[in-house]
Amino acid sequence: MEKLNRYIIGSNASIFQKIDPTTNVEVFLPTNEEEIKEAITYAREKNLPITTKGGGSGMSGACTGGLREKVIISTQRLMDVYELNFGKGYAVVGPGITPDIFNALIQKEQPNWKFFVSPSSRDVATLGGMLSTDGGGNDAWLAGTMVDSVLSVELFDLNNNKIIVERTGDDLSKSKITCEDKKLEKQLVEKGFSLLDIAGSHGVLGFISKIKVMIKPLPEAGKESYAIVHANTLDNFGRIIHGLIEYDVPLTYGETIVEARHPEISGPTNPPMFILKYPIEYDEKVQDVCKNIDNVDFTSIDLKEFKKFADIRVKMAKRNPPVGFQMALFEGYGIYGDNLLRFGEIIKEINESLEKHTFEPFIKFGHAPSVYYEDNKKIKGIIMHSREKRPENLTPKVVFDGIVSCVKTCEKLGITPKPEHKWPYQKTTVKYKRLVELTDVLGKQFNPFLLESELEELAELVL
Amino acid sequence: MTSKTEDEISELLKKCVQCGSCLAVCPIYRATKNEVYSPRGKLYYLKLKEAFPEKFDEELAKEYAKTIFTCAVCSRCVENCDAEVKLVDIFLEERLASVDQFPLLVQIGENITDEMNVYGLDNEMRAETWTMELYDDFPDIDDRIYSEGMTADTILFVGCLMSFRSRHTNVLKSILKVMEHIDENYIILGGEEYCCGHPLDLLGKIEEADKMRAHNTEVIHKVGAKTVVTDCPGCLEALIDHHKLDQAIKIQHMTEYFDEKIESVPNKLNIKLKYHDPCELFRNNEVTEAPRSLMKKMGIEVEEMEPSCCGGGGMLRVTDEKVATDIMKQRITIEGLDEEGACVITCCPSCLEQFEQNGVTSWDIAEYLVKALNLEEEK
C-alpha cells in the first residue's frame, strides 16, 4: 500500500485538495519517538521539506505541504496517553489523539473530568493540529483557545534535537526552554521562544511529539441553564455578543448561526441566533443583555432541546446547499470590539464581495462570544466561519480573485481574517515576521510553503 | 441499490467535503489507523484520479481495489456523513469494477450463480444439512419442507450461512421450537430457497443477484405466504429491498416476528447480557426496538454497547481476515468482552460466528427465547 499511502495522505478538509500525489515523496506513520526521528532524518538527508498531517480536518490546508515535493509525517498513530494526573489536573498525550477519544479515556477513569477545548471537528481533529492552528471550540469563552490549555510541548527540530517549551505562568509569551543542544537552547531563549509562538504556527517550527495539557472537572450537574436567543437583525445579533462580553457571562457553551440559506437549517433555527449554556445563577444577567436590545427573543430550553440545536449547529459546517455543493473559500472572520455593533453592515459587505466573484453565500456560523489570539493579544468577539456555494466554473483565477477580495474587505472593515487561505498576505503580520525570525534559528525545512508561497500558486490546488 | 453512472458518481464525489468525520466511526480505519482504508481516503483517491488521470496506473488500481474490499459495509460512514454522501453506493460500484482481481470472491460469485448458494454445494442439501440433526425434536420436520403445491402462512427464510454451517443448527432448532409452540403454520423452502443475492450485491453483481431473487419471489408467491421471517439481516435487507415481493407480504426479522407474537414468557430469565446490534439490522433495516422489546419480555437486561461493527460484515472475513480479527479485538477491549463471565447476545449468524471465532461466548436471542418459554433445557 506504500504508493497508495502517498496518494491518499493529501486528503484534507480545506479547499486545497488538488495535491499532485507524486509530490508526496514519502509518508511516515510513526508510532513512537524513534520512528519520528527516523522520519525526520530521512527528510533531512534527502533535503526534503517536512509536512505534518493530523486528522486533516483543518481549513488551512497546512497539512498538504503545497505544490512542492515533500515528506509527510502523519500523527495518526501517535495517540498515546502517557500520563493522566487528576490530582494535579494534567495529562501528557501524543499529538495524534482527538478530543473525543481523549475525553472518552479521561471519563473512563473519572466520569466528571474533561479536556476543555471542543472544536466542531473534535471527532477528527488532533491535539497537535489544534495547537498548530490554535483552534478553539464552543467552550472557548471560558477555556480559551488550544494554547490556553497547554502546559508544555515537546518538539523535534530538523536535527532531532528535542526542545521542551514549558509554561511558566499566565503570560503565555513567556516559557521555559530546555533543549539537548545547549547552543540552540540559548538562541531560542534569546529569541523569547514560547508556547504562543507554537500556537498557530501550522507545523513550521518543528514536529510536535508530545503535549502536556490541563484537564478539569465538569461544572456541577443540574446547575446550568440552556437558552436560545433570536435577534431580528444582524446588528442586534452583534449587540448581543457585545453585551455578553460586557457582562462577562461565564458561558460554558456559546454557538451561533448567523445565516443559513438552507430550509432544513434555517427552518428550525431562525437565524441569526445563539445557543447558550451557562451557570444557572447568570440567568438574570443573560436575560438583561437581551432585554436591553430591541426585538430579541430569549427562550429558556431544556437539555433535550439544547442538544437538538447543538446537533444542527455542529453538522451544518459539512452540509451542502439544497442545490449544488459547498466550499469554504475564506473560512474565518474575527469580529470584535465596536465592529460587533455594525454586524449587519459587515455581513452585507462580505456577501457583496463574495457575490461579486460568483460565490453565492450559503451559511455563516461561529463560536460567540469567543476568544482568540491575534499578534499575541487576546481578542474577545466572534470567530465566524463561512461556507459558500461552489461556482459552476471554478478556476484558480476565480479562487484567487475571491480570496483577494475577502482579504481586502477584511482590511477595509477592520476584521481579523484567520490566516487560512491568505498565507501570502500574512507577510505583513506580526505572526509571519515572528515565524520567519524563529525559522532563521530552527531551520526552514518544516512546511516552508506556508511562508514562501504566493497565493496564485496555492489557488492551483483548489479541486 | 441502483447502478450509478459516472456522472452520478462524480456528483457524489463533489458532495464530499473531506471533513474526516467518517474516520472516527469507520471500524477499518480504527483498526488499521491508515487513511487508505478510510471512507474519506477511498473517495479522495477517486477525486484525485479525476484531477490527475495520467498519474494513476495498474499498480495503484490494484492497491485501491484491495482497500475497496477491505470494508465491512457497515454503513456507519453513511450514517455519520453530514454532507449526505452515499459512500457505500460508491464503494459497491468500485467493487463491481475490481472484483475480478480476487479469485476467492469470483469463486463465491460462481458458487451462487451455479449452485444457488455461497458454498457451491448441492442446493438440494440446503434443508437436509441441518434438518437431519433435528429429527429427535421434530419427527415430522420433512413435512415442513416445501414441495410443489404446498402453501403456508409463514415462510422461514433460512439463508446460506444458517443452512450450511453447523453452529446455527441450534439457533434454527430454537426458532422452530418457538414457532411450533405458537402453533405457526410455516414451511421452509429447502432446495427451492436460493441465495438472497446479498453476497452478490457486495461484489457489485446486481444482475446475477436479481436472477436469484426472481426465483425466490416466484416460489414465495406460489406458497401464498403472508409473512416471511428470517434471522439473517443480510437476507432481510435483500428480501425487503430487492425481492419485488407482493406488498401485502410482511417481511420480518425473527426478533420482530417473535416480539409481535409473544406477549409474555413463563420463565423470566433475570440476567444481564451485552447486546450486539448487527450493522445490517440496526443501520440498514432500522430494526432496533424489536430485539430490545423481546429481550425485555424475556427478562434480559440489556447492557448496551457502541453500535459498531464486529468485523463480520461486507465479506471482510474473506477479503481480509486479519483486519476482521483486529476489529473484533478492539471491540473486545473497548466493551470488556474479555472479562470473566462476559457474554454477548445477538441476532445475526455472521456476527455470532465472528464473536465465537474470536473467543467470545455468544448466543442468538432465539437460543435464550426457548429457555424463557420453558422449551429448552438450562444453559
Image (cartoon, coloured by chain):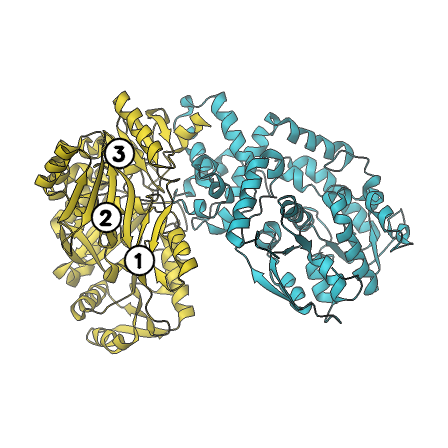
Q: Is residue A369 above or below residue B119?
A: below
Q: Nearer the viewer, residue B191 or A47?
A: A47
Q: Which residue is mark 2?
A: A152
The residues tagged by marks 3 and 1 sit, at their Cα atoms, a distance apart of 40 Å
Chain letter for the cyan part: B
Judged from this view, the residue extending furthest toward the left is: A190
Q: Rate crowding at label 2 as few (under 14), some (14 to 19) or many (20 or more) other CA atoms within 10 Å.
A: many
Distance, label 2 to label 1, CA atoms, is 13 Å
Residue A463 visible to an observer of this rendering: no
Q: Position of residue A444 (x, y in %)?
A: 19, 30
Residue type indicated by callout 3: Ala
Q: Nearer the viewer, residue A58 or B208?
A: A58
Q: Between disc 3 and disc 1, whose residue precedes? A: 1
Write down the quadrant of residue B290 in the picture. bottom right
Residue at horizontal 46 percent and vertical 39 percent from the top = B38
| Quadrant into which the C terminus of chain A falls | top left
Camera-near label (3 vs 2) is 2
Q: At which x and y percent is residue A109?
A: 41, 59
Q: Which x, y percent locates residue B76?
A: 51, 49
Q: Amino acid at mark 1?
A: Ile
Q: Earlier in the sequence, mark 3 or mark 2?
A: 2
Q: Are marks 2 and 1 in contact (CB under 8 Å)?
A: no
Which residue is under mark 1? A215
Question: How much space separates mark 3 and mark 2, taking CA atoms?
Answer: 36 Å
Q: Which residue is labeled 3 in the image?
A: A459
Pointers 2 and 1 within a single chain: yes
- Total numbered labels placed on residues in the image: 3
Amino acid type shown at disc 2:
Ser
Whether residue B233 sits left or right of residue B8 in the image: it is right
Q: Position of residue A103 (x, y in %)?
A: 38, 55
